[in-house]
Image (cartoon, helix red, strand yellow):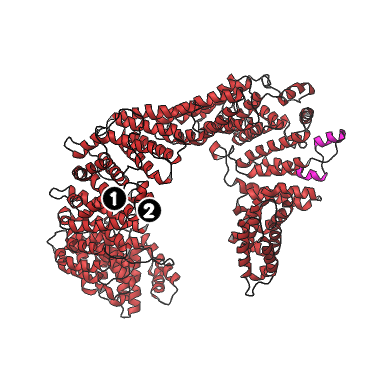
């Protein structure tokens, strides 16, 4: 046990009010740690602290009691015996009478009451004594805020966890709580008081008990806070919002039916308030309270409630036509006024559901017998066209439609009464006869529209149809209803569904595409969609009618694509019908949907002369296909057939139109179908089949006839195949690779049939090189497609004869095939460091792969290979062979691109070999100063072509640094399973920057320096900003030099813009401000030169934005440049681009405001 001398000083520190708070806190934690480790008991603490707990010095006594209380707070999970808890509870209970030490007493009581059973808690007897002391000694409203809050927390804890202890106190307890919470104003305390009332009611659940006699008093206290008017200050640390307070008060209102005589009249009265927030709160409270008070109590207020709700709905329904035309539900009403109407409708629905479920009450009678409703009905159906309705008429129509909609869908009995009172009259107004149904599935124009169409009647009729459909399928928490024979509404729907379908179809035939008639499109489509989505089990709609509706929509999709609005509405309806059928598991409707919709629309893929543009075809097919997996599989089958058919026409026959179609189909397949399938099942089978089919198409095509669009088609095929292969399992990928390798090995040029050795390639192999140079289009496609597949493989997917493949890819890299270079980089990135399997023909180590590439001659193109002993001369021979067959400049550029992608694979896996490639590229950049002559330059000298390296080769070497660090969409990313080392960009950036900066410093040629700055620009623009800001002190000046030099060349405009974005990032980062401040003059000078940059508008715009950011620097650093900036901005105000002029105005204002003197120009 700890000796008193080791911890008593901590007590003395805490009770000394003059000590700093951090010392007091540390002392408290030290004592708590001793108790937790059982080195000190609570009995010992109390015994040694007796003097502080009982002293007449109220400051020391208060600090001592607070120390003991805070100690208990930190020991809430520390087991204590019952005697100790009893003793401590008695002590703190007695201290509630000590007003000078009350704060510590409250903290101690709360700490004890919050203990759980497994660590020892306060007994019922002790809790009762504590409650009595609370009621006798505390005048809560006279206390400070923090102490009041703890008083309420103490009450809340006693009521929730010690109900049996406090309940016997009866009226004294209720009266004491009323006294404590009365006149409270603090938001946090109010949140507690509202909850206390809610819990208090649960303690005294007997309706004839203590609560009944105090219900009026409690409500009188609560009602003063309604409606909650509380604006939370933005700069306040309070976590209490108005919605929190309002929700807590609402729960208190609804906590007991005893509040009903007071609450309902109050809420109805507040509905007449001029404050929209008060109306909204009243409606929310009314909805919530009716669910808790019971039907018997609410029924007494039914008439008054209906009158208030009717007024709110009719007054605040939207006048915006879009709500009517689009048939939006109340939840979509966005304005504050519309929210009142929406909340009133929710309230109406809840009340009707509750009263309808109780026998003897029928709220619906108030609605159908209401004179105002009848007057509105006659008014809105007395006008024919929608355009003839006034704004007030549209508001009334929308209000009536929602009222009838809500009323009809709450129950079958309500639906019957609504249909009896309104539906038959609506059908009569529309002129629909139950005998007018035509079995013909096509649209007909037997009705005269639009002059004779009553839009109000049509709108209300469709609302009622939607309501009874919702009744049958169920809505929110309501279960589906199965219609009975005696249901009047069901009989009406059955009798008139066929004629109504003809009627609605006729509206779509008769109306044009003018904006004034678009309301008929909305109406017709919505009504037909509703008829098609009645559940089959309820049977008010026959199968024939449902199929007729589907046929109508198909005819619109296939024959009226020029009417954009109608076409899109029909497609949306078909998608929603398909989704409904899939979710309802209706096999009969599913069969109809499959035969009519899927069969008819998917046949569009095989029709070249359908008159519908291909993008619209695919939009329709995609929408319908995504409603269910079976539909999508049918779509995929059709797509595959269309792709195969168009492949032959495009690639073999050279049909340009088929090539355009095929590219679009492939882009759709990779951009829409594959992503959707990944979220469901069946992706593996589809992707595998697609990839194999592509290779089958190429195998069956002995020769390709492609024109200038051939590359676009190849890119689309590679993208789709790569995405399909990338998400397959390693097993499926192995099958695809094997298939493609077999095809590749059958090529006439394939040099690996007899395995080309790594020995020097002599001149007798020239025929092989010449064969590769003169490849057919088909062979080029095969190698490119094979390369794209390799980039998408998992690291564990075996590659047949991988060593031979590496040689082949290296040769094609030298020929200029970028996919081959990407494939090499991917293989290098995913090669294992060691091989653990016996079978090694399909796998090789990283070192072995690099050795194969090096010996095939890729490194030797640019320099004496640093990895080679240089004894076999293979590099020179490969170079010579290719120089005979191709341009030496292109040969060098291709080698650089290949090395860049290999380096990228090494960079991402964090391998040190990338440094050798980077150094090789730097040597190429430095060779522009003629200090070093490359092997091919030596050949050029002998041929009399001059010693200088071609500038395009130098530029390629600089651009290689962009490949090394930039993110790629086509390979070497997470999607295609690349090996990625954390922070690989930062690691490479930090290792290369010192070398680059040193090379720039030592360069003695302006050409070499410019090339080095280009490489530096790529490196810094692709690196993470955090890494750049960390080194901003040494990078900022080279960055400005790079911008200055690179901006002189039009070819560097994109890189210049990227560097400006880097500068902008540094300017906006707090960690870069010191470096920016030191280089402020240089930065501003360079930015001013870019304001007139002629090659790219965003460069000028970004430069001006950077100048605005510079105004945040210290005054003394930027003021000397003020005049120059303002003069430059004057010129920028004449820029031909508006966005630049706007930024110039903003910049001018910012720089003019840094001094009080006015502008003089």
Res. 934 image quadrant: top right
Q: In which quadrant is the N terminus drawn?
A: bottom left
* Magenta span includes 227: no
In what element is the residue under mark 1? helix
Q: CA distance from mark 1 to mark 2?
A: 16 Å
Res. 244 image quadrant: bottom left
Q: In which quadrant is the C terminus drawn?
A: bottom right
- Image coordinates of residue 444 in percent, x first then y, are 35, 32
- Image coordinates of residue 366 in percent, x first then y, are 18, 52
Q: Nearer the viewer, residue 216 or 930?
A: 216
Q: How many marks?
A: 2
- Image coordinates of residue 833 in percent, x first then y, are 61, 35
Looking at the magenta stretch, what is its main secondary structure?
Answer: helix
Mark 1 or mark 2: name the one nearer the start of the chain: 2
What residue would you read off at disc 2? 320
Q: Are marks 1 and 2 in contact (CB under 8 Å)?
A: no
Q: Is residue 290 left or right of residue 324?
A: left
Q: Residues within 10 Å of mark 1 (few under 14, many from 20)?
A: many
What residue would you read off at disc 1? 380
In what element is the residue under mark 2? loop
**Is any part of residue 121 visible from this angle?**
no
Q: Nearer the viewer, residue 710 or 1063?
A: 710
Q: Is residue 750 above or below residue 1080?
A: above
Q: Nearer the viewer, residue 580 or 981?
A: 580
The magenta-colored residue range is 924-946
- Image coordinates of residue 1092 in percent, x first then y, are 70, 57
Measuring 50% from the left and 24% from the top, which residue is drawn there? 641
**Is any part of residue 1103 visible from this angle?**
yes
């Amino acid at each position: 046990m700890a000796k008193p001398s080791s911890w008593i000083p901590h007590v003395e520190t805490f009770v000394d009010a003059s000590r700093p708070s951090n010392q007091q806190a540390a002392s408290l934690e030290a004592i708590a740690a001793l108790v937790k480790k059982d080195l000190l008991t609570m009995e010992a603490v109390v015994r040694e602290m007796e003097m502080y707990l009982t002293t007449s010095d109220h400051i020391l006594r208060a600090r001592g009691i607070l120390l003991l209380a805070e100690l208990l707070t930190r020991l809430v999970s520390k087991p204590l015996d019952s005697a100790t808890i009893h003793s401590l509870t008695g002590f703190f209970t007695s201290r509630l009478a000590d007003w000078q030490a009350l704060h510590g007493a409250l903290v101690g009581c709360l700490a004890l009451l919050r203990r759980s059973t497994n660590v020892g808690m306060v007994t019922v007897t002790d809790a009762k004594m504590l409650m009595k002391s609370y009621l006798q000694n505390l005048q809560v409203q006279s206390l400070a805020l923090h102490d009041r809050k703890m008083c309420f927390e103490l009450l809340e804890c006693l009521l929730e966890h010690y109900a049996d202890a406090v309940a016997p106190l009866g009226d004294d307890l209720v009266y004491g709580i009323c006294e404590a919470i009365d006149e409270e104003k603090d938001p946090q305390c109010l949140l507690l008081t509202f909850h206390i009332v809610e819990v208090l009611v649960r303690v005294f659940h007997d309706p004839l008990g203590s609560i009944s006699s105090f219900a009026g008093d409690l409500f009188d206290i609560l009602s003063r806070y309604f409606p909650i008017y509380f604006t939370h200050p933005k700069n306040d640390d309070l976590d209490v919002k108005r919605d929190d307070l309002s929700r807590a008060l609402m729960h208190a209102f609804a906590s007991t039916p005893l509040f009903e005589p007071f609450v309902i009249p109050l809420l109805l009265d507040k509905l007449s308030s001029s404050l929209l927030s008060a109306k909204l709160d009243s409606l929310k409270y009314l909805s919530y309270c009716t669910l808790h008070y019971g039907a018997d109590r609410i029924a007494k207020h039914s008439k008054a409630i209906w009158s208030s709700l009717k007024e709110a709905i009719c007054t605040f329904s939207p006048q915006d036509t879009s709500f009517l035309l689009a048939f939006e539900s109340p939840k979509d009403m966005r304005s504050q006024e519309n929210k009142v109407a929406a909340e009133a409708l929710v309230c109406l629905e809840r009340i009707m559901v509750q009263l309808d479920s109780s026998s003897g009450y029928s709220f619906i009678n108030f609605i159908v017998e209401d004179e105002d409703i009848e007057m509105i009905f006659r008014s809105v159906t007395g006008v024919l066209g929608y355009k003839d309705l006034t704004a007030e008429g549209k508001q009334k129509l929308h209000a009536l439609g929602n009222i009838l909609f809500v009323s009809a869908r709450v129950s079958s009995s309500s639906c019957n009464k609504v249909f009896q009172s309104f539906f038959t009259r609506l059908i009569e107004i529309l002129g629909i006869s139950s005998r007018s149904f035509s079995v013909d599935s096509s649209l007909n124009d037997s009705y005269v529209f639009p002059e004779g169409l009553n839009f109000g009647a049509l709108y209300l009729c469709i609302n009622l149809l939607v309501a009874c459909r919702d009744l049958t399928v169920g809505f929110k928490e309501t279960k589906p209803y199965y219609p009975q024979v005696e249901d009047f509404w069901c009989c009406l729907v059955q009798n008139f569904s066929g004629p109504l379908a003809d009627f609605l179809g006729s509206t779509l035939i008769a109306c044009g595409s003018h904006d004034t008639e678009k309301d008929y499109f909305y109406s017709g489509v919505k009504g037909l969609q509703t008829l098609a989505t009645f559940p089959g089990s309820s049977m008010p709609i026959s199968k024939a009618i449902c199929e007729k509706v589907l046929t109508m929509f198909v005819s619109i999709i296939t024959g009226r694509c020029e009417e954009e609005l109608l076409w899109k509405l029909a497609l949306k309806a078909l998608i929603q019908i398909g989704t409904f059928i899939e979710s309802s598991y209706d096999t009969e409707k599913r069969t109809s949907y499959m035969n009519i919709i899927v069969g008819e629309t998917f046949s569009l893929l095989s029709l070249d002369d359908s008159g519908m543009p291909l993008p619209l075809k695919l939009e329709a097919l995609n929408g319908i296909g995504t409603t269910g997996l079976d539909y999508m599989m049918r779509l995929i089958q059709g797509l595959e057939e269309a792709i195969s058919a168009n492949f032959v026409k495009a690639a073999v026959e050279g049909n340009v139109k088929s090539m355009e179609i095929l590219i679009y189909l492939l882009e759709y397949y990779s951009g829409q179908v594959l992503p959707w399938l990944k979220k469901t099942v069946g992706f593996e089978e589809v992707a595998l089949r697609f990839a194999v089919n592509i290779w089958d198409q190429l195998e069956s095509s002995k020769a390709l006839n492609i024109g200038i669009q051939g590359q676009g088609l190849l890119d689309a095929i590679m993208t789709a195949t790569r995405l399909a292969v990338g998400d397959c399992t390693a097993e499926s990928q192995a099958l695809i690779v094997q298939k493609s390798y077999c095809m590749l090995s059958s090529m006439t040029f394939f040099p690996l049939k007899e395995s080309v050795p790594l020995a020097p390639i002599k001149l007798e192999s020239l025929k092989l090189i010449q064969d590769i140079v003169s490849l057919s289009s088909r062979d080029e496609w095969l190698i490119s497609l094979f390369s794209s597949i390799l980039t998408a493989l998992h690291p564990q997917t075996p590659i047949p004869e991988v060593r031979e493949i590496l040689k082949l890819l290296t040769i094609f890299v030298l020929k200029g095939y970028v996919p081959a270079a990407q494939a090499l980089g991917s293989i290098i990135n995913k090669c294992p460091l060691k091989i653990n399997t016996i079978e090694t023909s399909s796998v090789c180590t990283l070192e072995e792969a690099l050795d194969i590439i090096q010996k095939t001659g890729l490194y030797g193109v640019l320099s004496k290979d640093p990895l080679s002993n240089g004894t076999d001369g293979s590099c020179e021979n490969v170079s010579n062979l290719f120089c005979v067959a191709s341009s030496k400049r292109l040969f060098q550029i291709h080698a650089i691109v290949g090395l860049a992608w290999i380096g990228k694979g090494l960079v991402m896996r964090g391998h040190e070999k990338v440094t050798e490639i980077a150094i090789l590229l730097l040597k190429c950049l430095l060779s522009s100063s003629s200090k070093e002559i490359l092997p091919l330059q030596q050949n050029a000298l002998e041929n009399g072509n001059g010693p200088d390296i071609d500038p395009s080769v130098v530029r390629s070497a600089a651009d290689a640094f962009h490949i090394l660090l930039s993110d790629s969409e086509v390979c070497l990313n997470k999607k295609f399973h690349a090996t990625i080392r954390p922070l690989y960009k930062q690691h490479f950036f930090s290792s290369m920057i010192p070398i680059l900066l040193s090379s720039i410093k030592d360069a003695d040629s302006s050409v070499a320096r410019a090339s080095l700055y280009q490489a530096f620009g790529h490196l810094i623009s692709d690196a993470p900003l955090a890494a750049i800001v960390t080194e901003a002190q040494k990078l900022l000046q080279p960055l400005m030099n790079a911008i200055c030099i690179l901006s002189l060349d039009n070819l560097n405009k994109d890189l210049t813009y990227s560097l400006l974005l880097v500068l902008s990032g540094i300017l906006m980062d707090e960690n870069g401000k010191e470096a920016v401040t030191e280089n402020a003059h240089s930065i501003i000078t360079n930015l001013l030169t870019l304001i007139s940059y002629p090659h790219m508008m965003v460069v000028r715009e970004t430069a001006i934005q950077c100048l605005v950011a510079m105004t945040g620097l210290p005054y003394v650093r930027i003021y000397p440049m003020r005049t120059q900036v303002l003069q430059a901005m004057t010129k920028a105000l004449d820029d031909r681009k508006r966005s630049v002029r706007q930024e110039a105005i903003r910049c001018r204002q910012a720089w003019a405001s840094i001094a009080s003197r006015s502008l003089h120009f």
